[in-house]
Image (tube, grey):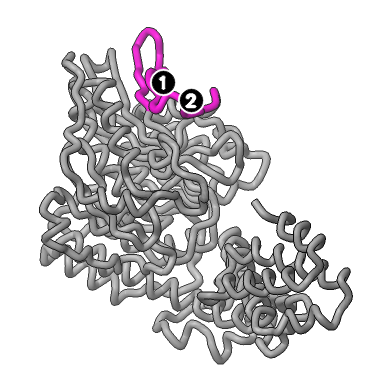
Amino acid sequence: MSLRKLEEGDGGSADLGGSPAAEERQQEDLLPGRRLPLLPWDRFSAWLHCVCVVGFDLELGQAVEVIYPQHAKLTDKEKTNICYLSFPDSNSGCLGDTQFCFRFRQSSSRKASWHCLLDQFDRDLPIYLKSLVLISKLPYIHFFHTVLGKIAPEYFEKNEPFLEAVCSDIDRWPPPVPGRTLHLPIVGIVIKVRIPTFRDKPGTTQVLQSTPQTDTLVSIALPTVHEVDLFRCFLPVFFHIQMLWELVLLGEPLVVMAPSPSESSETVLALVSCISPLKYYSDFRPYFTIHDSEFKEYTTRTQTPPSVILGVTNPFFAKTLQHWPHIIRIGDIKLSGEVPKQVKVKKLKNLKTLDSKPGVYTSYKPYLNRDEETIKQLQKGVQQKRPAEAQSIILRRYFLELTQSFIIPLERYVASLMPLQKSISPWKSPPQLKSFSQDEFIKSLEKAGPQLTSKLKGDWIGLYRHFLKSYNFDGWFRTRRKEMTQKLEALHLEALCNEDLLFWSQKHTEVETVDLVLKLKDKLAEGENLPVETGTMEKLQMHIDSIILALPEDLQGILIKTGST
């Protein structure tokens, strides 16, 4: 969110100019997963749902003044959430230029959420405020912050005609295909980014390759689209990074109380990212206010606090969320050459409404011992004025190694649930995965546990038992089970394609052959989403065609039409 004085001015348009993205656009006639030609705003929708302008008037209150493109749909509940979340909560002391992000639940789904990034400006404070809001399903926070930083100042001067030009630029972008390096023109500049893949390790973003032909017009090359400044966010509490990693890993209810929305949102995003490459499957709200539609759900004392990370700024939450088991209170985040004082873990009963000092308020006892070596390395870096980027690399590598040491034994055990390939028969249904046994997994840790890759001592077994009851394990295992099931189906399909199906059909009745063709057509449709070897689908189509051609003409016509689109 960027706070600027609003001055009246003429509308402007973006300077599109020549763009290195032209060739990429020609190659991307279709969006991923689509067969139909692109329509206007399809490219825009691949990046953003819409752009909103939210205004606040002391007499009229806040309202969504502009939604672009105009056909973008937002429910009344979603508009209300955007209105209230687009401005600092009471007593946050957030005035002037500022950026932050927030999330809220889509009205049509309890699982999907919008990622919203704001750039806010003022005129004659506190009478008039406005926020420019980007709404997207993509978690590319760093990238969208960069985009906002470029378009907001001009929009504040030129208003809606400029916003229309910006959206037209975005509608010319190639889709965000994982693994691709893209050149994205906007308001006369070109931003070069690489879209991450699920195989990327945190902190190991591939270096963008430069070529003279395409990079002459590049204005900004972003090394990452989603990673935050990890060390800056953890600086106030970095003596407790071990414990915070455990709390996030276990999906424990966690509140971050910060002085501003930007510090709140950055800290929550840093917490969520600390267990990467393991995905955080519970809900998280980088900025949460008393006006949020889930306020009652998350603050009720009649049930156990939900598995969610909340970022708040209103001191009112110190009392409302006092029953939550884990609360982080941070002051202003500043990078200085002084080693921060060690903030002790404090009991929740010591958390008061207004005068509480920064600290971690919890009765949680970590399962693992603290990594004193990493703490000393970070402290030394502060004393030696090591660049924040280098400190973040150290911290991210620590989290990565810790998460990998934890997850590798799980990956190894789950891989053992996969049936042997020799048990796959083309004439039988694919075999089922073995069931996950907690006792068997715990037993496997004796010889193949985290002690093979981590020096940290502690109650690893207790940590695993707790994790197996969490949303993060449930989400992780569901994903792995789906991947392995698809792999089994792919191996079954490949085994089927290696058989002489035409010879089989000649030895069976027409009814059996027609049934085979219909099943093979179903396999052909399902195979588009399976990790099959190159050429498998083409081989299957050839099998289908050869079997149909060997049938009587009346059956040929029926089978050719059946399943065709």
- The magenta segment: 52-76
Q: Residue furthest top?
A: 59
Residue 367 horizontal/vertical position (percent): 50, 71
Q: In terms of secondary structure, where does tag 1 sit?
A: strand
Q: Are marks 2 and 1 in contact (CB under 8 Å)?
A: yes
Up the image or down, 386 lies above or below 73; here it is: below
The residue labelled by disc 2 is 79
How far apart are the alpha carbons under marks 2 and 1?
Answer: 7 Å
Residue 485 horizontal/vertical position (percent): 65, 71
Q: Quadrant of the N terminus?
A: top left
Is 53 magenta? The answer is yes
Up the image or down, 370 lies above or below 506; here it is: above
Looking at the picture, which amino acid does disc 2 mark? Answer: Lys
Residue 443 horizontal/vertical position (percent): 64, 86
Looking at the picture, which amino acid does disc 1 mark? Answer: Val
Q: Earlier in the sequence, mark 2 or mark 1?
A: 1
Asked whether residue 236 appears in the rendered view, the answer is: no
Up the image or down, 357 lies above or below 547; here it is: above
User: Which residue does the image show at 33% across and 34% down from the upper left?
Assistant: 118
Q: Quadrant of residue 294?
A: top right
User: Which residue does the image show at 41% across and 82% down from the upper left?
Assistant: 454
The residue labelled by disc 1 is 64
Is 84 magenta? The answer is no
